[in-house]
Image (spheres, rainbow, N blue to C red):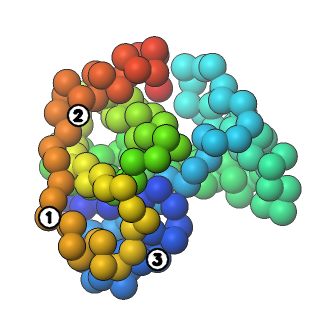
Amino acid sequence: MRQINLFNEDCAANEWRLCQLPGDFLVWRKNYLRGKLPDTNDLSEFNRIRSAELHKIAPEFPETDILRDLEKMHDTLLSLTPCDQLTLWFDTCPYDQIMLTRILALLANRKQIPQITLIQKNLAWNKNAFLKYHTHGSTITTQNLNQAKKTLGRDDR
């Protein structure tokens, strides 16, 4: 059984490390905020187009590195099984809600869905917040996943 903690940005992951809470982590960076979002069912194509878009915004990062990072994010998320625990740590800002909806929609298309807990607060995640709220999550159900899929208007992403 794997335990993955998924964060909205690197600074949250850095603070989480200080807490010595269990599990590994995955950072789902705010990579949907700028540039076009591809309208494709193919995740490889989505990642390829997004890496090109993100490279335009941040040319100091090689496009191949951005692509590898996107693929790792998706591969880690989509490799989770029903025996695995995924904890989603998000704040309530609109940008985080976009990311959260996308993550839930991706998971909704899986035949085997991990155990998912959402810990969502209107705050910037730091060590004190992680320690205070790490047991205050809500279980994400199949109904929640299907709603995310419906919100995106796609059955395949």
Query: Which residue is rendered at x = 21% and y = 73% of the image?
Result: 132
Distance from Cα at disc 2 to Cα at disc 3: 30 Å
- Amino acid residing under circle 1: Thr
Can you give x and y, in whole percent of width and height, for residue 31 in the image?
62, 47
Circle 1 — which element? loop
Circle 2 — which element? loop
Labelled disc at residue 14: 3
- Amino acid residing under circle 2: Gln
User: How busy is the neighbourhood of tag 2: few (under 14 within 10 Å), some, or many (20 plus)?
Assistant: some
- Amino acid residing under circle 3: Asn
- Quarter holding the N terminus is bottom left
With respect to residue 129, does 51 lie above or below? above
| Mark 1 or mark 2: whose residue is earlier in sequence | 2
Hey, which quadrant is residue 151 in on the image? top left
Residue linked to disc 1: 135
Labelled disc at residue 22: none
With respect to residue 41, does 23 lie above or below? below
Residue linked to disc 2: 112
- Of 148 and 75, the residue lying toward us: 148
